[in-house]
Image (spheres, grey):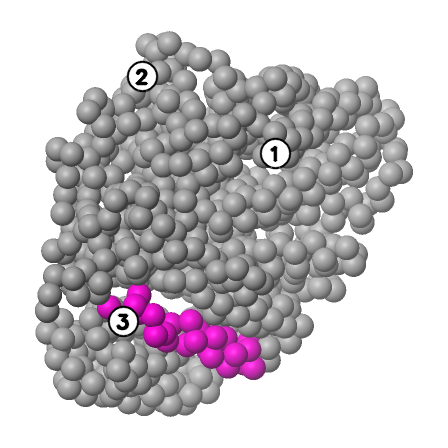
Amino acid sequence: MKGDLDLSKLQTHGFGPRTTMFWGTLAFITLEGTAFALAIGTYLYLMSINPQWPLGAPPPGLLPGSIITFVMLASVVPNHFLKNWAREENLPLVRAGLVLMSMLGIFILVIRGFEFPQLKVSWDTNAYGSILWFLLGLHTVHLLTDVADTIVLTALMFTRHATGKRFSDTEDNGVYWDFVVLSWMPIYVLLYWVPRW
Amino acid sequence: MTTEVVKEVHLRDSSLPDNELHAVLARTWATPRGLIGWLSVVDHKVVGIRYFITAMVFLAAAGLLAVAMRLQLARPENGVLGPDLYDQVFTMHGTTMMFLFGVPVMEAFMVYLVPLMVGTRNIAFPRLNSFSYYMYLVGGVMLWIAFAFNTGADAGWFSYVPLAGPEYAPGKRVDFWAQMVTFTEIAALSVAIEIIATIFKQRAPGMRLDRIPLFVWAALVTSFVIVFGMPSVMVSSTMLILDRLVSTQFFNPAEGGDALLWQHLFWFFGHPEVYIIFLPATGFISAIIPTFARRPMFGYLPLVLALIATGFLSFGLWVHHMFAAGIPALGSSFFTASSMMIAIPTGVQIFCWIATLWLGRPVFATPLLFTIAFIVTFVIGGLTGVMVASVPIDLQVHDTYFVVAHFHYVLVGGAVFPLIAAIYYWFPKATGRMMSERLGRWNFWLAFIGFNAAFFPMHILGLNGMPRRIYTYPLESGWGSMNFFVSASAVVLAASFVILAWNIIYSIRKGEPAGPNPWNAGTLEWTTTSPPQDYNFARIPVVGASDPLWTAGGLAEAHGLKVESRELVVTTTAEAQPDLRESSPVPSIWPFLAAVTASATLIGSIFTPWAVVWGAVPVGVTLIGWFWPKSVPEDEE
């Protein structure tokens, strides 16, 4: 029939906005970003209605949170290279990059374990303690999910399944890591520096 | 390599005659049989129908609760329901209607129709779709089982603190409510993401942005409203659970928390929620009117812009639910203005629909009758909406039956009537049979008269001072006779739903055969068989107009997809140029298993926070099982 199209020459996997998975990842990032924004809004709301802030507790200890911030910011660099290697479908470098990112993720999670006690207030003491634990908990859930996902993907890339669209998945996983880093920055300022102003 | 071998490795639709193509595609896209096959299903049509049936069962259950309430209120000082049971009944009614019927039934239609309307073979992320259904089902059934054991939610569908907090609501009633929210929001967010990805990437070649059917536009805007609105209720209901379970202090003013914080977070979701239900309904109307007016829609562009504007504005209204809570005057003025502003895009839509009917040659079949019922009823609800958007009026009628009347006019008029129209309209597509027009007319008149007779007097009852959510009222109030009339009319409305149910059940078995396009409609879902085959379209259509079936010369087709593994064409986001051939996931039991472990974790966490810790392991295992590639061609691309 007139105007008929031939699809047989099309590629079977692509990268970035060309793929369905990219938009799915972006939509997840959007909804989770909204949740972060609302939790941050809750912090500011509670701060605005309480004359004293932080409420009945000293400001949180700076060290573990600052280490995490530094390592996260530094991790953006290898993550950037990893995304490029994925696009080039360079398997040895993708494997190396994924191993590095997994190790960085595990390191950050371990430090996160030291971060909670440094909040210096319990979740049930008052609303200030509640929102601190909530924000840190919410971010930790994202961290945990992404690190677990990265480890599984790393394992996958050492099997015979390391083909075609797995490289695209690797790139999307890198985009998600950027989101985990980006979402941490306002939380870091809120948790550690706003109470010191 | 010889040509023969290439053909064997990559058998394409272009190399097969029609009958062979159907046979091969049917094998490739078939849903496996048996219990495991039944639980592994990834066909969007099957999942959509499951969503629909489940939502209609919840509609019936919540409808029966409404009948029970009307029985209790039929005369003053009645004793059918006591105060405690009445609290549970009205809370279960509202909660079920909003969370377990209103949103899911719209998801049902989006999941079923969007892939067919954009001309693709399955929804994007079909396993997530299957997972979402199970989460919805478990969340809803959990709430109702709790109700059966006298642990039904009882703090209203919006569970205001402090009433819903640990101090005033001991026991587990509110916890089941809050956790039901988690279940249904996981489901809704999943569906929203699938719909967005499907519409962005899986439209048939040539379906540019300005050729997308209006229902699909409505589904897209709705999905974005879900993505931005629903996280708010997940955040707030999680905070509520934490306050109740591990003694956080979010909503406790004595420890720096705040009760109004709940209202802000809840209504930041709760108002868009209304549009999550209403926007797909406007999509139904925009699909039905051109078909029965027998002409293309008047004002396609203004309609699309109105949908998008409504989506944006729906986030600027939430404080109008809180006028009586004591907020700053400037806030009240702002939210009054924005609440009135949303009448503008809605007005644009209504005028476009009327113009289309005016310029067309309308055929008054049941779907169009319900469409007209929608326009009339919704306009009345919209007018009282503009009234309560004004602070002085709102303060007078807040928490009275006036508000009950208002939101039933917008929700039943604005969503349920279009829904019934949609059922009559797409039933032939989903089942291959027509519904009875005779029963349809009975259905229409009983619903229209019953609804208005039941709900219009509530405006007057509200103005006379009758508060909502009271289980009874004294004889001296003088509200008795009007309440009796309302209750009697509610029975008429209930009867209309019995007729609808009967029409559905009867027509599935005895209805007239429909054929592919019984209404002579213009959008792509009508080009395939009724009911559609597992693979939706044997050959992928190429779209050259916004009502492609009304274009002279017929549809062009795209060729070259593999047929022995599940393959889709992925197109560019704006122009819908063919770009990739992506594989589509095969059926899998893992989404079901993931839903089982996630459900056990969420239900466990109603009783102990440790459930989250221990549950994380099985949830993680099932998710890895879900995503790990299997030895099928679809996973090895």
Q: CA distance from mark 3 to mark 1?
A: 42 Å
| Left or right of residue A45: residue B90 | right
**Badges 2 and 1, same chain:** yes
In this view, the residue in front, B255 or B12, is B12
**Badges 2 and 3, same chain:** yes
**Quick check: A179 above or below B577?**
below
For mark 2, give the secondary structure: loop
For disc 1, the neighbor class at 10 Å (few under 14, some 14 to 19, many from 20) is few
| Residue B446: quarter of image | top right
Residue for point 41% across, 49% down: B534
Q: Which residue is mark 2?
A: B295
The reply to whether dot 3 and dot 1 touch (C-beta < 8 Å) is: no
Q: Position of residue B526 (x, y in %)?
A: 37, 32
Residue for point 36% across, 74% down: B630
Residue for point 33% across, 10% down: B359
Q: Which residue is mark 3?
A: B636
Q: Is residue B117 magenta?
A: no
Q: Amino acid at mark 2?
A: Arg
Choose the circle earlier in sequence order: 2 or 1: 2
Q: Amino acid at mark 3?
A: Glu
Residue B509: numbered disc = 1
Q: Position of residue B384 (x, y in %)?
A: 53, 24
For mark 3, give the secondary structure: loop
Instruction: Read off the magenta span.
Output: B612-637
Choose the circle earlier in sequence order: 3 or 1: 1
